[in-house]
Image (tube, grey):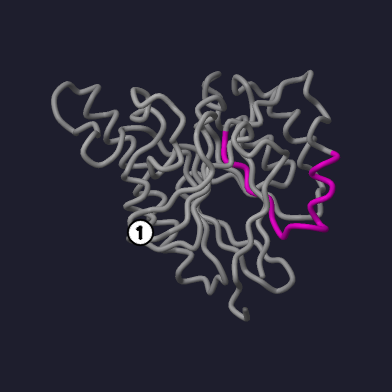
Amino acid sequence: MIRVAAVGDIHMGPESQGTLRSAFETLPGCADALLLAGDLTRHGTPEEAAVVAREIKDLGVPVVAVLGNHDHHDERPEEVSAILRDAGAHVLEGQAAVVTADGARIGVAGTKGFGGGFVGRCAGEFGEPLMKEFVRYSRRCADGLHGALKELEEQDCDVRIALTHFSPVPDTLAGEPLEIYPFLGSYLLAEAIDTAGADLAVHGHAHAGTEHGMTTGGVRVRNVAQPVIGQAFHVYHLPGAGD
């Protein structure tokens, strides 16, 4: 059995240094990897990223992350990513990473994702250039996720996980105001997951949402925003090749 710990929306700043470290240090005893589903900082500054880096450095398990909208706010996502990578994390945007634990190969495909809404109530690539670019950006994120999942298909992984910040399904947004669903996720992410294939999809972003959901193709979706799971991380169990 493969054990994957996940959390998002930890929104760390200088005064929160150390608040997660003691919990994260228990990970080698209960999980094979840690997934971070974006919004790791409050405003996306390098100083805040350094706080996160100290929380996750030398944990004894692989760490894979995507950034969230908060991590882009200061318009220095490359610096934030570099600081997290220096701490040992795999930071993904339209990319894949394979980490190993006890011989198991865990493949993670990641993108921040973007909004646009869900089938029947979604933005269209029509009209003003800004509107078209909004939808095209969301599509590029989804295409990157699809490509990364397909890449993992060729790398003999025991499990494949889609890691995003924005939600691929409306199920895990239940509890949020309906009016903001288009800004919390996009059906394009779910299409990418279903067409490329995955064993689990993990996201954050929806603080007032619901943990459990599913794509129309039957892939389990989990909202791991910390306000939703109410703890430092949640561990999900996935059958490996030998289970």
Q: Give residue 177's position: percent from left, percent from top.
A: 40, 24
**Residue 57, picture quadrant:** top right
Residue 53 against residue 160 in the figure, above or below:
above
In the image, 166 versus 140, the foreground residue is 166
Can you say which quadrant of the picture contains the C terminus? bottom right
In the image, 46 versus 12, the foreground residue is 12
Q: Residue reaching furthest left?
A: 127
Q: Does 191 lie within the magenta span? A: no
Q: Residue reaching furthest front?
A: 175
Magenta extent: 22-38
Q: Give residue 222's position: percent from left, percent from top.
A: 52, 48
Q: Residues within 10 Å of mark 1 (few under 14, many from 20)?
A: some
Residue 155 shown left or right of residue 215 in the figure: right
Residue at image mark 1: 194
Instruction: Give, as a three-letter code, the residue at label 1.
Output: Asp
Q: At numbered mark 1, what does the secondary structure look like: helix, strand or loop?
A: helix
Q: Does 24 lie within the magenta span? A: yes
Q: Give residue 118's position: percent from left, percent from top.
A: 29, 39
Tell me the residue at 24%/34% (across/down). Answer: 122
Residue 201 shown left or right of residue 218 in the figure: right
Residue 178 shown left or right of residue 90 in the figure: left
Picture mark count: 1
Tell me the residue at 64%/41% (across/down). Answer: 7
Tell me the residue at 64%/35% (across/down). Answer: 226
Can you say which quadrant of the picture contains the N terminus? bottom right
Residue 225 against residue 212 in the figure, above or below:
above
